[in-house]
Image (spheres, rainbow, N blue to C red):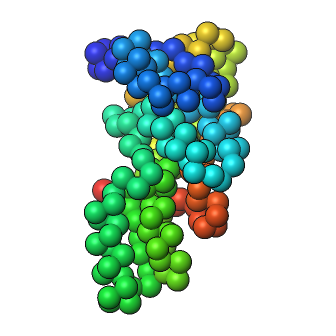
Amino acid sequence: MITSTLTNSGFTVNRLWFARLLGRFPLVGRLFRLRLSPEILPLLNSLPADEESGKLYAAAVTWMRVGRAMKTVGLRRNSLADEALIRLSRAEGLRTICDIGVSDGSASIRILEALPEARIRLFDKFNFFIVRPRKLGADIYNAAEERVYRRLGPLLLYVYDWARQKPPAGSVVRLPIRNPLLRRFRIGIEELDLFA
């Protein structure tokens, strides 16, 4: 637990220029334990629905932990599976498709583009974060209400936590994880824990 906390904690700057820097130089980010915090999601969620913003969003979300796992995202990262599904859908006339474990939804773009006539539903267990501001920082929880980060003061030092501690009642902010490219399809990401 201590090793996991040390290797996944780090400094961040909740700015888009910093997200672009980590996207271009991921090795530097890993070497210096730089991180992106879920608190950058309001900026990311306001990006336009263009290809460049979609790539930035996917790269930025990849730097976030949701518990024991990292978010793994990427535009068109499932191309072989997508092509097989598209062929099967067209040959068999499938009209309803459930894509499970979509993270920010960017990996589903190819299916959405190729099958506009199908009813496609996207699911992920962790489709939002919860932020609870504190006097000197914030507590950040995943969708299962497990605290995964603590921001200590204004220095933007994030300590990876993974405590099974639910957020106390009070003022919280819910930050959705949804790639801006999904806006043109008018589709959201529904919450679903496949293993439950």
Give the image quarter of residue 70. top left
* x then y, percent, for residue 134: 66, 20
* x then y, percent, for residue 39: 61, 30
* 101 to the left or right of 105: left
* 189 to the left or right of 172: left
Viewer-nearest residue: 159 or 90? 90
* 1 to the left or right of 153: left
Viewer-nearest residue: 93 or 51? 51
Seen at 45% across and 51% down, the residue is: 75
Viewer-nearest residue: 132 or 95? 95
Viewer-nearest residue: 173 or 94? 94
- From this view, report whether residue 8 is shown above or below residue 188: above
Location of the C terminus by quadrant is: bottom left
Seen at 59% across and 15% down, the residue is: 156
Q: Is residue 194 visible?
A: no
* x then y, percent, for residue 128: 55, 45
Seen at 32% across and 89% down, the residue is: 92
Location of the N terminus by quadrant is: top left
* x then y, percent, for residue 114: 46, 73
Seen at 53% across and 59% down, the residue is: 189
Disc tally is: 0
Q: Is residue 133 visible?
A: yes
